[in-house]
Amino acid sequence: MSLNESRGIDIRNLRIAYPDRDHPAIDGLTESIAANETVVVTGPSGCGKSTLCRAIGGFIPEIIPAAVGGEISIDGIPVWETDSARIAQRVGYIQQDPDAQICTLRVEREIAFGPENLCLEREEVLARVDESLAAVGIEHLRHRETTDLSGGEKQRLAIASILAMRPEILLLDEPTANLDPDGAKRLFDLLAKLRDERGMRLIVVEHRVRPLMSMEPRVLVLDRGRLVSRHPRERIPSRSLGVQNGEGKPAISPTAERLLSIDRLAFGYGEPLFERLSLDVRSGELLGIIGPNGSGKTSLLRLVAGLAEPTAGRIETSAGTAVGFVFQHPHHQIFERTVIGELRIDAPDRRPDELVQWLAEGRLDGLADVPPLSLSLGEQRRLTLLTALRREPDLLLLDEPFIGQDRRNVAWIVAQIRSHCGRGGAAVLVSHDVPLIEALADRILYLDEEPILGAPSEVFVQLRSRGRTAFLPGFWEADG
């Protein structure tokens, strides 16, 4: 049978076990995905969603070692018995972590890399680069170095590089995790267009299911490597977290200790990201930061942490203030060979049973001896949050901590942040999850060409007046 015939994806009794885990990542999964279907795969962090994508794309076991059983076929062709180059021409895989996918130093070269490896003519390669840049809205980044991009810009680049290959099947592992709301909406519109106009088949791993409702997907729910439920197109599970809006809580006293002071700060990469930015953060306060990709949110946290130098202005912390930083990309701050070893870095005198208890609190139980870089991205984030909290910082900097988390894990992270601030600490939280920022933050800083700083209700009024409705808490609900 020709590899070009569209019969769908058939998965039969699939079992995948990683060498460093006691339990299989996928355990006896059987499912058929029709040729004309859009499928969303959801479920708890670490349940096997990314593993399923890697297996369908042929990355397991050829590139990622694992013991496998069962079979996967695409249009009647067994994936594990077919040359991986042939599969790669049909199946595009957009990974959860864009850093793991980017392999060149310039944006234009990154997008051209795939088509060049297909041995296409130069004119065709350039045409695909132009088309892909425009599709994801990053024409202005064409000549930028990939190392200077924000997390969201990298995610758009990773998507563009795969689209340039023109696959027939697209696997997307949390494709909007690092995107601002406007970028996420644009991506979902693009996916619908690719499906409707090109007949592209889509398998999307997402915790945020509601924004995909307009595409009428079928939803598969995994838990511990097993398929536990299917939802037809008209019954999409709710993503409500039950986090109450924080507008009614007592205002932070102006006499509370000032832990962070920023005065007339300026910074940029060639072009300025922000100029003359001034603000204070006081004991007990949670400052939420929102804004478009590339507006300087991560850069501001790096400046506060002392990992970058401002162009002008001043950043000061009060005497004795300890700063903890949870990075946007957790593998950038993981150093040890085991999960428990990572916790021991700042707690060398703690008993092993205490460390194990900490892991259980972060839903990392049973993973003490596992290499931390083999954890799922959501698990890595919880590990880096645990290590930061165990240092007992006064000022906690959090860069997109909710990415890759299911509702239960988000609730746990929220509880940790609130407890930290309740003890007199302060937190600066960057997130694209605007409803959560609204619920948690005492004040919000919106970063863009004209920053806005104030109480959540005040900031949202100004954003509405500017027409920046994608950054309002009800954006997805209004759109769905």
Image (cartoon, rainbow, N blue to C red):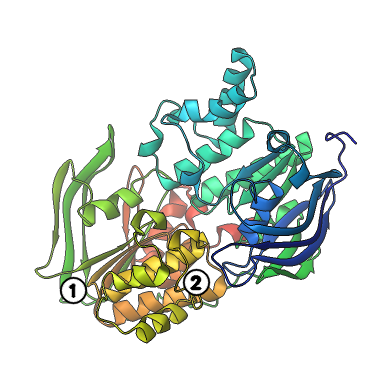
User: In the image, what residue occupies the spot 21% across and 77% down?
Assistant: 253
Q: Is residue 348 above or below residue 109?
A: below
Say if 62 sits above or below 412 in the image: above
| Rendered-image quadrant of the N terminus | top right
Quarter of the image where the C terminus is located: bottom right
Q: How would you rate the neighbour count of disc 1 (Cα within 10 Å): few for under 14, some for 14-19, many for 20 or more?
A: few
- Please give left or right for residue 344 compared with residue 205 in the image: left
At label 2, the amino acid type is Val
Up-down: is 71 above or below 351? Answer: above
**Residue ID at (59%, 53%):** 65
Measure the alpha-carbon separation of dots 1 and 2: 30 Å
Task: Give the amino acid type for the residue marked by disc 1 in the picture.
Answer: Pro
Query: What is the number of callouts on the image?
Result: 2
Packing grade of label 2 (10 A; few <14, some 14-19, many >=20) is some
> Helix or strand or loop: what does disc 1 sit on?
loop
Is 183 placed left or right of 91 in the picture? Answer: left
Residue that label 1 marks: 254
Residue with the mark numbered 2: 410
Picture quarter containing residue 206? bottom right
Residue most extreme to the left: 319
- Whether tag 1 and tag 2 are in contact, CB under 8 A, the answer is no
- Indicate the position of residue 56 as horizontal and vertical percent values: 71, 50
Q: Of circles 1 and 2, which is in front?
A: 2
Q: Nearer the viewer, residue 414 or 48?
A: 48
Instruction: Give residue 231's mark.
Output: none
Q: Using residue 224 as the reference point, say whether residue 451 is left or right of it.
A: left
Would residue 139 be visible to someone looking at this image?
no
368 to the left or right of 46 = left
Q: Tag 2, which secondary structure?
A: helix
Residue 316 in percent (x, y) is at 13, 59
